[in-house]
Amino acid sequence: MHADMDAFFVSVEVRDKPWLKGKPVAVSGDISTRSVIATASYEARKCGVHSAMPIFKALNLCPNLILIKADHKKYEEVSAKIIKTLSSYSPSVETASIDEAFLDLTYISKDFEEAKTVGEKIKNEIHAKFRLPLTIGISSNKLLSKLASKIGKPNGLKIILPEEKDLFLKNTPIEKISGIGTKTAKLLKHKFGVQTPGDLREIPLLTLYSTFKSRAIFLYNAARGIDTTPIIPDYEKEHQKSIGNSMTLPFDTNNTSYLYSVLKHLSYVVAKRLRENKLYAQNIIITVRYSDFRTITRQVKIRPTNTSKVIYLISIKILKEVQLNRKIRLLGITASNLISSPVITLFESFDKREEIIDKTMDILKAKYGKNITNYATLMNIKQRT
């Protein structure tokens, strides 16, 4: 089973602000026109507004669009409660994102009819408890259950039986297959004339491999509805895979001192989240998006850390290696390959001074507010905005 909340962020806001019901609404982390849409209501989607669309473009398409600043803490709290509810129906629940999860019904339902009954109970309970819409897809594997939920949206329940999968795959747009992104779909269409998974079936594996390399096997299997990916229950996951933060700049720039200030802020935010989760990063990834929306990422392996200074210095080093003769519109830092207990050898030690500074800032911000203390180099960011 794939359980997918409908327009989750917007649905939570509409629930808490009933006057928004039936109106074009969008949620964004930053409601400035340089930011992007996180989630849009179905009324807004009718105007062409969608996730990841720049706000200025969304407003051009939908001038009466109501923008709401995201409240991630609230969404995370609601999500945790929903996952807890789902876990009461199956011992194997894998959280896929803040608004979706997979449930293994192998030992819960003897057939698809029973699985449908379970799905209906879940939908009813989610609506009764949280007053939120939920779409459920049920099939024989992750790929097909997620396709079923996409077909069933909004607020529906769709089952794809094993004997029906060929029919669904024959008539489904290739973009609806989970794991086939916009670029891959575009290449499949332009180079091979592929419009549906049915079309994709006609292409030999070796032909796919010449273009897509290791991804060819996934495409070959996806066209046939094959997916052997297991459901990994949340309790079996050791820890988060990554922690990141990004900032869309208030103006395009290649001014190094300003970019360094932004990186310093992002480094502190990422390091703080690592410390809150008692995690240490072994890889740092920097994302740079230029004014023409071209995006690049660079990754560096480091000894385990959760201190702001180390992450900042690594970030600076990476930024110096990328092209700075063009203006930048977004910077991001991601800490990955996370561990909970670093091994420190005789010749390695953490910078205790920096650790003390970080923890002191954490305490002050928690007690007196996030703006009570900051790095001096960051004080001019709002003024420059």
Image (cartoon, helix red, strand yellow):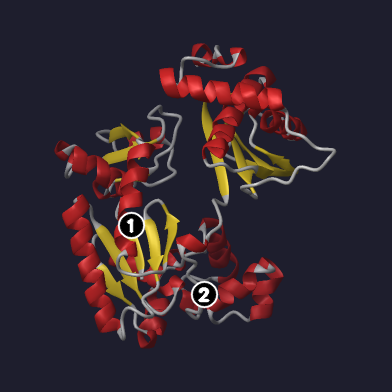
Q: Dots 1 and 2: beta carbons under 8 Å?
A: no
Of mark 1 and mark 2, the one earlier in the sequence is 1
Secondary structure at numbered mark 2: helix
Residue 359 image position (x, y, % from top left): 57, 26
Marker count (numbered): 2
Is any atom of residue 299 visible in this view?
yes
- Circle 2 Cα neighbour tier, 10 Å, few/some/many (<14 / 14–19 / ≥20): many
Find the residue positioned furthest to the right.
347
Q: Considering depth in this image, is 190 or 268 the residue closer to the camera?
A: 268
The residue closer to the viewer here, 225 or 280, is 280
Labelled disc at residue 84 = 1
Tag 2 residue: 222
The residue most toward the bottom is 163
In the depicted view, which residue is nearer to us: 14 or 347? 347
Q: Residue at left 37%, top 44%?
A: 76
Judged by depth in the image, the label closer to the viewer, 1 or 2, is 1
Task: Determine the CA span between mark 1 and mark 2.
Answer: 31 Å
Q: Is residue 280 above or below residue 189?
A: above
Residue at screen point 22% across, 76% down: 117
Pinpoint residue 106: horizontal percent, then vertical percent: 38, 80
- Identified by mark 1, the residue type is Lys
On the image, the x and y values in percent for residue 139 come to: 37, 77
Residue 23 visible at all: no
Q: Secondary structure at mark 1?
A: helix
